[in-house]
Amino acid sequence: MPDSIAEVVEEPVGVDASTSLYQRILNDIRDRIVSGEWEPGYRIPFEHELTAEYDCSRMTVNKALSQLAKSGLIERRRRSGSFVRRPQSQAAVLEIHDIRIEVEALGLPYRYELMAQTKRRATTVDRERLGPGPSVAGQVLALQCLHYAGVRPFCVEDRLISLAAVPEAADQEFLKSAPGPWLIGQVPWSAAEHVIRAAAADSETAADLGLASGAPCLIIERRTWSAERPVTHVRFTYPANAHAVVARFTPSDS
Amino acid sequence: MPDSIAEVVEEPVGVDASTSLYQRILNDIRDRIVSGEWEPGYRIPFEHELTAEYDCSRMTVNKALSQLAKSGLIERRRRSGSFVRRPQSQAAVLEIHDIRIEVEALGLPYRYELMAQTKRRATTVDRERLGPGPSVAGQVLALQCLHYAGVRPFCVEDRLISLAAVPEAADQEFLKSAPGPWLIGQVPWSAAEHVIRAAAADSETAADLGLASGAPCLIIERRTWSAERPVTHVRFTYPANAHAVVARFTPSDS
DNA sequence: GTTCCTGATATGTATATACATAATCGCGGT
DNA sequence: ACCGCGATTATGTATATACATATCAGGAAC
């Protein structure tokens, strides 16, 4: 340990020398935003402050902030500074959407109900659901929930959480509030995959949603990773008339 | 007509003075790529060549090219130059997908069939379908097509083209090849909006697709704009089991 | 002929500097 | 109290410059 390699590097620890400085600044800020440490509306340090913090030129900081602005995470205002934006309907599909917000946007009262909660050792099927990545071995938490808009069921949520990635979830009771918003606050996710498809409701889902068996449904599945590691898989099933996914796109920003 | 408004503008034509130089370079290159003028594999001019062409510093050109690389449109290789990338499965939903390619990826022979083609003055409904924007007034072309995978119908296409935006479409016969690929080659699109939803097949669509009436379908609608101007609206209807939309996402690039 | 080295080249990152622009603050005048 | 105007401030864009790094081409050495 007291030796050759150690002496070359003098970094504080945990700093990846391979990534560029502006990329490191960008990642630092992005992580603080997606983790919720800096909430929407929070004023990000001024360029000249970050310049001092990272001991670099303003151009370097500017490059990082400009990219964050372009990707929609922050908003920059002259003379005022840069602010964390509230999650816009921006990229839509891509957004980790919050069903409560979705329901309330329709002007209906939101209610959440936990139907089942199971803790078990991950089966092969569970591992497939969570997707590729290391350390999926351990235990998982399986949840079935129902989201209501007014008195009517709005969507069924079927979720799997990797306790290897989120050990705190084992102690949580998801009786009052949905696991989605809690997870977002808990784990800074770094990648997500969405699959959107249509299907006929099976008899169980149909019963939960108050539909005829075989009624058309929209199914949105999402896998989430945090630093290459699978965190959760969730499947939302909506009655066909209740929901649509909207995505706006301009090739390379605009 | 020879009057007030016309006199205010004195630009050479089409050059927007409000956008910055690097943004203009970015747009120019992007347009040439999405229009197909520069095909995948094409070597984009070197930075020093663009520097000369736009009479600016290398940093400015570099900013434009770096962003295009980050958004995945081009690939940059040291010492070799920058190249147009082949459309990756990248942004998925957002991608203008080609059904022929989709079908052939399944290993099935592709066949296309034109069911109906109508030219008419744009109705109110047509204008709504095309979306907001100027000059939607004129004539439109309405098309109904069927795409086959092997012997079985794969999806129904219901398309509206604004002849104000694409006058050449009036003279086209879409008997042999689908309007989608042709349009992409014709009009450099600058923005697109997708709506994805599920629905029960109406009797007509069900008949076309060989389904029972009321069978669940996945519907993908897309509006496309070229420079703020509506170009086309298209609705693809797939049997529920035939298709899913996949989107991968990393907040602000990665 | 093969291996290795060297130089040329294009991109990648960072710096200091400059000026433009938008928004805000505060001062002074009416 | 209100209005207007200039000063201040943070961001937006562009420049010239510098050095790092990956990669390729061509030649030297074996």
Image: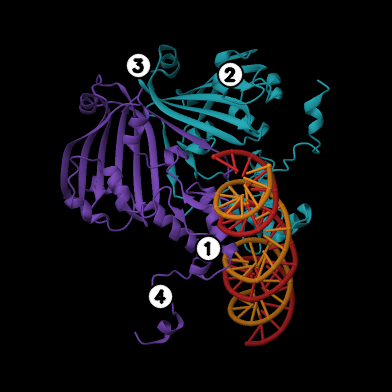
Chain colours: A purple, B cyan, C orange, D red
Q: Cα distance, mark 2 to mark 1?
A: 46 Å
Circle 4 residue: A12
Q: Position of residue B215 (x, y in %)?
A: 35, 19
Instruction: Report the chain holding disc 4.
Output: A
The answer to whether marks 2 and 4 sit on the same chain is no
Number of labels in the image equals 4
What's under tag 1, amino acid-wise? Answer: Tyr
Q: Is residue B234 above or below residue B245?
A: above
What's under tag 2, amino acid-wise? Answer: Arg
What's under tag 3, amino acid-wise? Answer: Gly
Circle 2 residue: B127
Label 3 secondary element: loop
Instruction: Report the chain holding disc 1.
Output: A
User: The N terminus of chain B lies in which quarter of the figure?
Assistant: top right
Circle 1 residue: A22
Q: Cα distance, mark 3 to mark 1?
A: 54 Å
Q: How many other residues sit within 10 Å of disc 2, few (<14), some (14-19) or many (≥20)?
A: many
Q: How many other residues sit within 10 Å of disc 3, few (<14), some (14-19) or many (≥20)?
A: some
Q: Cα distance, mark 1 to mark 4?
A: 18 Å
The answer to whether the residue labelled 2 contacts the one labelled 3, judged by CB atoms less than 8 Å apart, is no
> Of discs 4 and 3, which sits in the foreground?
4
Q: Cα distance, mark 4 to mark 3?
A: 63 Å
Circle 3 residue: B214
- Whether residue A55 sits left or right of residue A190 in the image: it is right
Going from N to C along the chain, the mark reached first, 2 or 3, is 2
Q: Position of residue B28 (x, y in %)?
A: 69, 44
